[in-house]
Every structure is written in structure tokens, then in C-alpha cells.
Image (cartoon, rainbow, N blue to C red):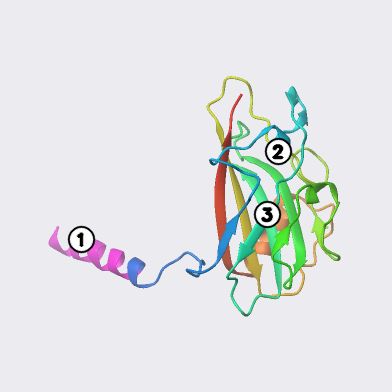
Amino acid sequence: MKIASRSAAALVSLLFAFPLAAKPSGFRFWSPDVQGPKLGLDQVFDGMGCTGKNISPALRWSGAPSATKSFAVTVYDPDAPTGSGWWHWTVYNIPAVIASLPRNAGSGAGLPVGAVQGMTDFGKGGYGGACPPKGDKPHRYYFTVFALNVPQIDVPATATAANVGFNVNAHTIAKASFVARYGR
């Protein structure tokens, strides 16, 4: 038993010595539109029984690594009762000189030149707001910005969110996230 506990202690020491998270201490991500951290009716889907405005929030980031060549942003709900969660937004090939997305960029308005919006689990590109089933506990919505080591990923706008995610994760040098909640 002593050998097993020494091995476990050594493994834990290694994990703390070499952090797995790719988040430099200065890489930050936030939204001036998401308060408390709760999504408002502006960020809620309009359809499937939900009556929101389906407007993507303004997003801001700072402190990305100097080696960043592009960014990607995703919004994911792990609490959706699908067995695999729900992708609400994927936008990628955001030029490295950009450090924000304006409110309603998910409609295509104000999206940086060259940026691509991938398919969501609503079956279309662009932002799809929160819409958890009535009576579920509030769902968590993970907003994540990824700093990538390539100027663009070669993925068509018709690709699934899983395909986008695979390619984004293959080129991630850092990421930063925040979580918002919404229930009805």
C-alpha cells in the first residue's frame, strides 16, 4: 500500500508541476452584456418555445499570447438533455488583431472580415441563444475564446461544431472562458 500511495503522491506532484490548462495568467475573456453571470432575454433563443431576442452578447478579450495568429469563440451548453450537450455558437478565423466581437455579431453584423460562423445544434450558422427545457435547473453556457497558432483553420462553414472543435483544439495555444446561466 505504501508504494501505491507514493506513486499517487508523485503523480499529483507532477500534475501540479506541469499544469494542463492552457491559460496564461493574463488571458482574460468577458462580456459587458452578461450580468451576474446570467443571460438576459436578449441572449435567449427565439423559437422552440423560447421567446428571446437571439442577440449574441458583446465579447471582449485581452492578454492573448504573442504567438497568437487567430482566434475562435464557442458557446456550449453541457446541461442540454441530449447526451452530448448543445453547441450554441462557433465562430473561427477571427484575425489576431481583433480583441472583441460586437453585440449581435452572431447575426453576421459586425463580424470581422474573414471570420466564419459554423453550424450550431439548431441546424444553422450564427448565434443560437439559450433555450433550456421548461422546468430544468438553470443551464450553464460556457463562452470560450481560443488563441490559435494558425491564421485560419481549414473548415467549411457547413462543418459540424464537433469538426470545428477538433480543428480548434488541435491549434489552441491558450484559452479563456466564462460561464453564464439561464433557466425558465
Residue pictured at 70% horizontal, 75% vertical:
69
- Specify the amino acid type for callout 1: Ala
Q: Is residue 15 left or right of residue 62?
A: left
Above or below for 132 versus 148: above
Where's residue 39, x and y in %?
62, 37
Residue 53 quadrant: top right
Sequence-wise, which precedes: disc 3 or disc 2?
Answer: 2
Residue 33 quadrant: top right
| Residue of label 1 | 4
Magenta span contains residue 13: yes
Magenta range is: 1-14
Residue pictured at 72% horizontal, 36% vertical:
42
Magenta span contains residue 72: no
Residue 115 quadrant: bottom right
| Residue of label 3 | 59
- Specify the amino acid type for callout 3: Leu
Sequence-wise, which precedes: disc 3 or disc 1?
Answer: 1
Sequence-wise, which precedes: disc 1 or disc 2?
Answer: 1
- Specify the amino acid type for callout 2: Gln
| Residue of label 2 | 43
> Distance of mark 3 from mark 2, alpha carbons?
12 Å
Residue pictured at 74% horizontal, 57% vertical:
101
Above or below for 41 versus 152: above
In the foreground, 163 or 22: 22
